[in-house]
Amino acid sequence: MQDKRRIERMFSRMRLYEARNVIFSFGQNLIWRRYLIREVEGRLLDVATGEGNVLKLYRSGMGVGVDIAEGMLKRAPKGLLLVRGDAENLPIRSSSFDTVSIAFGLRNVPDKVAALREFNRVLRSGGKVLILDMKIGDRMASWFALPYVALVMPLLTPLFGGDIGDYLYLFRSILNFPGYDEMKGLFEKNGFRMEKAYYFHVGSTYLFVGRKVSGL
Ligand SMILES: C[S@@+](CC[C@H](N)C(=O)[O-])C[C@H]1O[C@@H](n2cnc3c(N)ncnc32)[C@H](O)[C@@H]1O
């Protein structure tokens, strides 16, 4: 299912996207995105922006959103600057942003190294990268988060008209997402330094803060 077309279709047809996030995360997703926004510096490129939930929290006119799924972009509020595109091949000029963010998006991108290389390319020297995502199995979250994401979420999904297959995909992507050490290594190999990491919800969700230290 790590097929981009299928991922794009899955998100485009997803109904009540943000309502599900709020319910499944007990409203915590709204707080996590605010932590991300506090880390943003200057002009922001929000990759995998979806319905623009990160972008709309930032200063108007200072951010651009990119997403692969037309259906998600169509549901974003009017007035946001949005472009359709792939994180692995961004339709963005080199060195044109101060911060790149990606919230709950990188785990859906098949080639994470290609995406990190693109983030490096579009960032100015010294720019910041912010990666917010869910991860199970790295810290103490496993005892609660594993059964919750593996069983409770798929069982509740049909209530929102969702497809259980989509949630099984989601579960796998959360399990496979890089933890702190792996992400630090990925940062270092792709021209970033790990500056800080936040752990939310007993470690089930991370915000990695990286700084561009060299071009590629
Ligand atoms: C869980 S949503 C997150 C949306 C938004 N960042 C938020 O916080 O609500 C994941 C988003 O990643 C997008 N996506 C998946 N693969 C992508 C890719 N290769 N390039 C760009 N966007 C992608 C999906 O279309 C979807 O909108």
Image (tube, grey):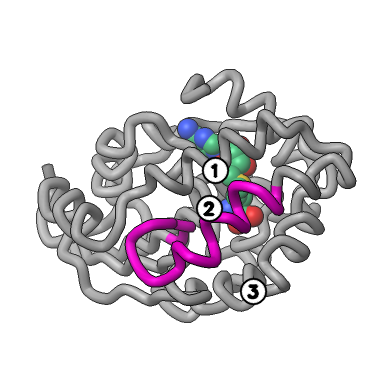
Q: Amino acid at mark 1?
A: Phe
The quarter of the displayed image where residue 197 is located: bottom left
Q: Earlier in the sequence, mark 3 or mark 1?
A: 3
Q: Which mark is residue 1?
A: none
Give the side of residue 63 with respect to residue 27, left or right. Answer: left
**Secondary structure found at label 3:** helix
Which residue position holds label 2? 104
CA–CA distance in space, label 2 to label 3 = 13 Å
Crowding at label 2, few (<14), some or many (≥20) Cα neighbours within 10 Å? some
Which residue position holds label 1? 171
Give the side of residue 81 with respect to residue 16, left or right. Answer: left
Q: Quadrant of the C terminus?
A: top left
130 over 85 or under it: above or below: below
Q: Position of residue 7 (x, y in %)?
A: 59, 28
Disc 2 under 8 Å from ligand 1? The reply is yes
Q: What residue is at 60 percent from the left and 73 percent from the top?
A: 59
Q: Let me know if residue 181 appears in the view.
A: yes
- Viewer-nearest of labels 2 and 1? 1
Q: Position of residue 109 (x, y in %)?
A: 43, 35
**Secondary structure found at label 2:** loop
- Which residues make up the magenta segment? 132-153
Q: What residue is at 66 percent from the left and 72 percent from the top?
A: 30
Q: Position of residue 139 (x, y in %)?
A: 35, 68
Q: Amino acid at mark 2?
A: Phe
Q: Determine the quadrant in which ligand 1 lies.
A: top right
Q: Which mark is residue 28?
A: 3
Disc 1 under 8 Å from ligand 1? The reply is no
Crowding at label 1, few (<14), some or many (≥20) Cα neighbours within 10 Å? many
Q: Nearer the viewer, residue 197 or 56?
A: 197
